[in-house]
Amino acid sequence: QVQLLETGGGLVQAGGSLRLSCAASGRTFSGNTMGWFRQAPGKEREFVGCITSNAAYTYYPDSVKGRFTISRDNAKNTVYLQMNSLKPEDTAVYYCAVARFWWKPTEVNDYNYWGQGTKVTVSS
Protein backbone atom coordinates (compact mmCIF):
# COMPACT_ATOMS: atom_id res chain seq x y z
CA GLN A 1 0.00 0.00 0.00
CA VAL A 2 1.37 3.36 -1.03
CA GLN A 3 1.69 5.88 1.76
CA LEU A 4 3.04 9.40 1.94
CA LEU A 5 3.68 10.80 5.41
CA GLU A 6 4.31 14.51 5.90
CA THR A 7 5.97 15.70 9.07
CA GLY A 8 7.55 18.88 10.37
CA GLY A 9 4.60 21.19 10.63
CA GLY A 10 3.97 23.39 13.62
CA LEU A 11 3.67 26.92 14.91
CA VAL A 12 6.25 29.50 13.90
CA GLN A 13 6.49 33.27 14.07
CA ALA A 14 6.45 35.39 10.95
CA GLY A 15 9.92 35.54 9.44
CA GLY A 16 10.80 32.13 10.75
CA SER A 17 11.55 28.86 9.00
CA LEU A 18 10.25 25.32 8.90
CA ARG A 19 11.34 22.22 7.06
CA LEU A 20 8.71 19.73 6.06
CA SER A 21 9.47 16.13 5.15
CA CYS A 22 7.47 13.68 3.08
CA ALA A 23 8.43 10.04 3.46
CA ALA A 24 7.05 7.56 0.96
CA SER A 25 6.51 3.88 1.61
CA GLY A 26 5.00 0.99 -0.27
CA ARG A 27 6.95 1.68 -3.44
CA THR A 28 9.75 3.87 -4.63
CA PHE A 29 9.01 7.24 -6.23
CA SER A 30 12.52 7.98 -7.36
CA GLY A 31 11.28 8.02 -10.96
CA ASN A 32 8.44 10.44 -10.29
CA THR A 33 8.15 14.19 -10.09
CA MET A 34 6.95 15.08 -6.59
CA GLY A 35 4.98 18.14 -5.58
CA TRP A 36 3.85 20.13 -2.57
CA PHE A 37 0.48 21.79 -2.16
CA ARG A 38 -1.21 23.69 0.63
CA GLN A 39 -4.76 24.35 1.64
CA ALA A 40 -5.89 27.12 3.93
CA PRO A 41 -9.30 26.99 5.63
CA GLY A 42 -12.07 27.81 3.19
CA LYS A 43 -9.71 27.94 0.22
CA GLU A 44 -8.83 25.63 -2.64
CA ARG A 45 -5.72 23.50 -2.58
CA GLU A 46 -2.83 25.55 -3.94
CA PHE A 47 0.30 24.42 -5.76
CA VAL A 48 3.50 25.27 -3.86
CA GLY A 49 6.17 23.64 -5.99
CA CYS A 50 7.52 20.49 -7.55
CA ILE A 51 10.78 18.69 -8.18
CA THR A 52 11.64 16.31 -10.99
CA SER A 53 12.69 12.75 -10.37
CA ASN A 54 16.41 13.45 -10.70
CA ALA A 55 16.13 16.75 -8.80
CA ALA A 56 17.51 18.58 -11.80
CA TYR A 57 14.53 20.93 -12.01
CA THR A 58 12.25 22.62 -9.54
CA TYR A 59 9.33 24.92 -10.20
CA TYR A 60 7.57 27.33 -7.88
CA PRO A 61 4.70 29.78 -8.16
CA ASP A 62 5.44 33.44 -7.58
CA SER A 63 3.78 33.32 -4.15
CA VAL A 64 6.64 31.25 -2.69
CA LYS A 65 9.50 31.70 -5.16
CA GLY A 66 12.68 32.73 -3.40
CA ARG A 67 11.36 31.66 0.01
CA PHE A 68 10.57 27.96 -0.44
CA THR A 69 12.93 25.26 -1.66
CA ILE A 70 12.10 21.67 -2.54
CA SER A 71 14.70 18.94 -2.42
CA ARG A 72 14.68 15.17 -2.38
CA ASP A 73 16.72 12.19 -1.26
CA ASN A 74 15.79 9.27 -3.48
CA ALA A 75 17.82 6.86 -1.39
CA LYS A 76 15.49 7.67 1.51
CA ASN A 77 12.37 7.99 -0.69
CA THR A 78 11.84 11.37 0.93
CA VAL A 79 11.05 14.86 -0.33
CA TYR A 80 11.59 18.06 1.63
CA LEU A 81 10.09 21.52 1.65
CA GLN A 82 12.28 24.18 3.22
CA MET A 83 10.23 27.26 4.02
CA ASN A 84 11.97 30.50 4.94
CA SER A 85 10.74 34.03 5.62
CA LEU A 86 7.33 32.65 6.51
CA LYS A 87 4.30 34.92 6.45
CA PRO A 88 0.92 34.58 8.16
CA GLU A 89 -0.62 33.93 4.73
CA ASP A 90 1.49 30.76 4.49
CA THR A 91 -0.69 29.25 7.21
CA ALA A 92 -2.26 26.08 5.79
CA VAL A 93 -2.18 22.32 5.77
CA TYR A 94 0.69 21.24 3.54
CA TYR A 95 0.48 18.11 1.40
CA CYS A 96 3.00 16.22 -0.67
CA ALA A 97 1.94 14.26 -3.72
CA VAL A 98 3.21 12.06 -6.55
CA ALA A 99 2.80 13.45 -10.05
CA ARG A 100 1.33 11.60 -13.01
CA PHE A 101 3.88 13.10 -15.39
CA TRP A 102 7.34 14.63 -15.36
CA TRP A 103 7.25 18.27 -16.38
CA LYS A 104 5.58 21.07 -14.39
CA PRO A 105 2.57 19.31 -12.90
CA THR A 106 0.86 22.25 -11.20
CA GLU A 107 -2.77 21.16 -10.85
CA VAL A 108 -4.33 18.93 -8.23
CA ASN A 109 -5.48 16.50 -10.92
CA ASP A 110 -1.88 16.14 -12.11
CA TYR A 111 -1.19 14.04 -9.01
CA ASN A 112 -2.41 10.59 -8.08
CA TYR A 113 -1.05 9.88 -4.59
CA TRP A 114 -1.39 12.23 -1.63
CA GLY A 115 -0.30 12.36 1.96
CA GLN A 116 -2.58 13.28 4.84
CA GLY A 117 -1.00 16.69 5.33
CA THR A 118 0.82 18.54 8.08
CA LYS A 119 -0.41 21.80 9.56
CA VAL A 120 1.69 24.95 9.45
CA THR A 121 0.64 28.01 11.43
CA VAL A 122 2.50 31.28 11.08
CA SER A 123 1.76 33.86 13.74
CA SER A 124 2.15 37.58 13.15
Image: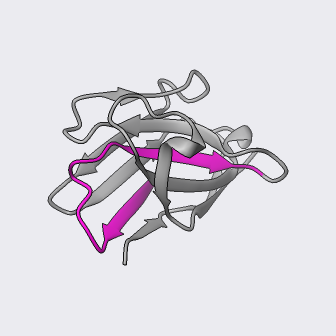
In this picture, is 72 found above or below 49? below
| The image quarter in which residue 103 lies | top left
In the picture, which quadrant includes the N terminus? bottom left
The spot of residue 52 in percent (x, y) is 29, 37
* Magenta range: 19-40
Horizontal side of 115 relative to 33 (left or right) equals right
The spot of residue 19 in percent (x, y) is 44, 52
Residue pictured at 47% horizontal, 24% vertical: 66
The spot of residue 122 in percent (x, y) is 69, 49
| The image quarter in which residue 69 lies | top left
Residue pictured at 40% horizontal, 45% vertical: 100
The spot of residue 65 in percent (x, y) is 50, 24
Residue situated furthest top in the rendering: 62
Q: Is residue 81 visible?
A: yes
Check if residue 20 falls in the magenta segment. yes
Q: Is residue 18 visible?
A: no
Check if residue 71 falls in the magenta segment. no
Residue pictured at 36% horizontal, 39% vertical: 101
In this picture, is 32 found above or below 63? below
Name the foreground residue: 82 vs 47: 47
Name the foreground residue: 121 vs 76: 76
Residue pictured at 21% horizontal, 48% vertical: 31
In this picture, is 123 found above or below 52? below
Name the foreground residue: 82 vs 33: 33
